[in-house]
Amino acid sequence: MTSPTSLHIEQQDDVLLLKLNRPEKRNAINDELILGLEAVFSAIPDGVRCALIYGEGGHFSAGLDLSQLRERNLVEGLHHSRMWHRALDKIQFGRVPVVAVLHGACVGGGLEIAAACHIRVAEQSTFYALPEGKRGIFVGGGASVRLPKLIGVARMTDMMLTGRVLSADEGLAAGLSQYVVGAGEGLAKGLELAKRIAQVGEMTTYGVMHVLPRIADSGQAEGLMMESLMATISSSSPEAQEQLREFLEGRGKKVMRNDE
Ligand code: 1HE
């Protein structure tokens, strides 16, 4: 797999690790980097069951590379935003779940990338902001669709209009991340979660990634119908049948309070 030097790729067993690698620009996302992400998530190698995105240096990402913004006219701006939408849709609705490991700045387009991932682990140093308000622009990488689903319209409005910056703990309480860990512990936690995710049956994973968000976007009647169809299809998969048999024969794992 070829990728720009600003995106480092490494496979560890069934987990694909992607490192945003422009620390000198605080992992600001230029076209090369967003196209690199789109290319990776369009062609996840066979055998990979989960991906993990993290950032080199002191920050996850400073968002859009603002130096590229000045050079665009109106139509180019529109195509640029749509390019981000395509790339981030590939992350959210791709082949495998994606864990984002956050630290330092997770702002603007960096937060948009994180929001397209399925699980977010934040180190204590993480701070979240939408500086678009300060720069006289609007979000363009999908934040207006994805963030209100995580934190609500009111919190996003606050972040954009008042420039409010949320800490890691505030982000956890608001729903921006599912986990907060200590300094330097994010990658280990992210990998631990990725390895667990890789064990989940493929049909269940597909349902959670592709069907659950569609159900959440539909009305009750359509949602319940999709749920019934998904439940029926998944429970008749050979994988599910085998795991149910294991449990009923006393060989399956029990649910424990701190499930390992
Ligand atoms: C950048 C960028 C960038 C840093 N584009 N070059 N995002 C923002 O408005 C956030 C802007 N960045 C910052 O507020 C700060 O850089 C940080 C808080 C992230 C980090 O601060 P610090 O002190 O560690 O680094 P720095 O000294 O500010 O930056 C180091 C270098 O990175 C410097 O370049 P240099 O050549 O002078 O060394 C900075 O110019 C450069 N740099 N951030 C370009 N964002 C799909 S639409 C999404 C819309 C958005 O994302 S808007 C939000 C943009």
Image (tube, grey):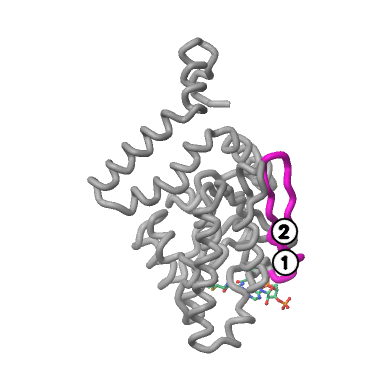
Amino acid carrying mark 2 in the image: Glu
Give the amino acid at mark 1.
Arg
The one of 147 and 39 positioned closer to us in this rendering: 39
Question: Is residue 20 rendered to the left or right of residue 170?
Answer: right
Residue 56: mark in rendering: 2
Is residue 18 depicted above or below 232 in this figure? below
Q: Position of residue 211 (x, y in %)?
A: 40, 46
| Residue assigned mark 1 | 22
Q: Is residue 218 left or right of residue 149?
A: left
Separation (CA) of disc 2 from disc 1: 7 Å
Judged left or right of residue 54, residue 155 is left
Image quarter for residue 39?
bottom right
Tell me which residue sits at (60%, 87%) in the image: 71
Secondary structure at badge 1 equals loop
| Residue 105 x/y as whole percent | 60, 62
At 38% across and 38% down in the image, what residue appears?
230
